[in-house]
Amino acid sequence: MPLALRDLQAAFAAHLRGADHGGLAGEVVGDAIPAAARLRVHRHHVFETLGAALAMTFPTAQAVVGDDYFRGLTRAFIGGSLPEQPVLAEYGAAFPDFIEGHDAARRLPYLADVARLDWALNVAFHAPACGRLTAADLTSIPADALPSLRLALAPGTALLGSPYPVDRIWMASQPGAPAGTVDLTGEAHLLVLRRPDDAAFVALSAPEAAFVAGIARGLSLEGAAEAAGRVDAAIDLSTVFARLLGLGAFAAAQ
């Protein structure tokens, strides 16, 4: 008896993930290539295409573990997480969390955060261009209204914190980087930003990161400043705010 359409779709999706369905081959019209072989071609194409997409999105993670190990990671991930959107640049958001729960995390506990940095750079690169808040934009706002001002981070801007120096790991993994070991002591607070034709990150101090995190949570400038002050009461908030404005971290006020 032929499979109902819903069952056929479910069986084909399961086959693409690596599970076989006994009746699926019988639903495929054969020609010079047997049905089972044609199904294997589809499965191979899915794993190869999605694996290549993940390699492009997570180049640093791939560089850290090597091509062969990364291929095994991606195959395990793809088997349980096929794309839900037709845009390959949007595929892989769950990959860092997958790595965190994988055996690789026991040997390389920083690998998931390296992948999170790769993903944040990917999101920033594909974020839409928009106006950025500048110091000149603030001149029209009364001084007594500034503390209550709420800002939004520019599209693609993200704050990444890690107990590992993922910025040093990232730099050491770039093509042409000098050979050597990476000192894995020290944490990282990174601000990922969209650039006109690229994406980049800059290192923040802990109070700077607390300030940005407050803005991201919807706090006013005053509230974000208080959050930063709890980390370091001696922080110069005017300098911090000026630096973030210069980096283009905030969306233009609407």
Image (cartoon, rainbow, N blue to C red):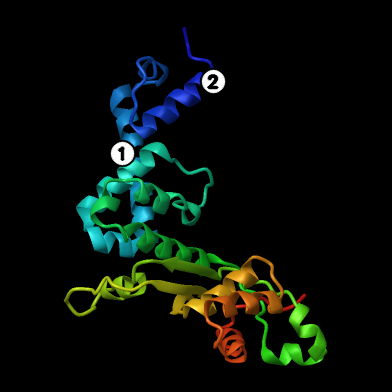
Residues packed near mark 2 inside 10 Å, few (<14), some (14 to 19) or many (20 plus): few
Q: CA distance from mark 1 to mark 2?
A: 23 Å
* Residue sitting at x 36%, y 63%: 114
Residue 69 in the image, given as x and y percentages of width and height: 22, 51
Q: Give the labeled residue for mark 2.
A: 5
Location of residue 32 by image quarter:
top left
Comes first in the chain, label 1 or label 2: 2
Q: Label 2 sits on what residue type?
A: Leu
**In the figure, is residue 108 to the left or right of 54?**
left
Q: Residue at x 20, y 52 (%)?
A: 68
Q: Name the amino acid type tagged 1.
A: His
Task: Please say if 59 is above or below 141.
Answer: above
Q: Disc 1 on helix, strand or loop?
A: helix
**Secondary-structure class at tag 2:** helix
Q: Which mark is residue 67?
A: none
Q: Is residue 195 visible?
A: no
Residue to which mark 1 is pinned: 44
Q: Is residue 163 left or right of residue 62?
A: right
Which percent across, then down, holds residue 131?
A: 67, 79
Q: Observer-nearest residue: 80 or 245?
A: 245
Quarter of the picture holding the C terminus:
bottom right
The residue carrying pointer 1 sits among few (fewer than 14), some (14 to 19) or many (20 or more) residues within 10 Å by Cα, namely: few
Location of residue 73 in the rendering, given as x and y in whole percent from the top left corner: 29, 47
Give the residue furthest to the top. Answer: 1
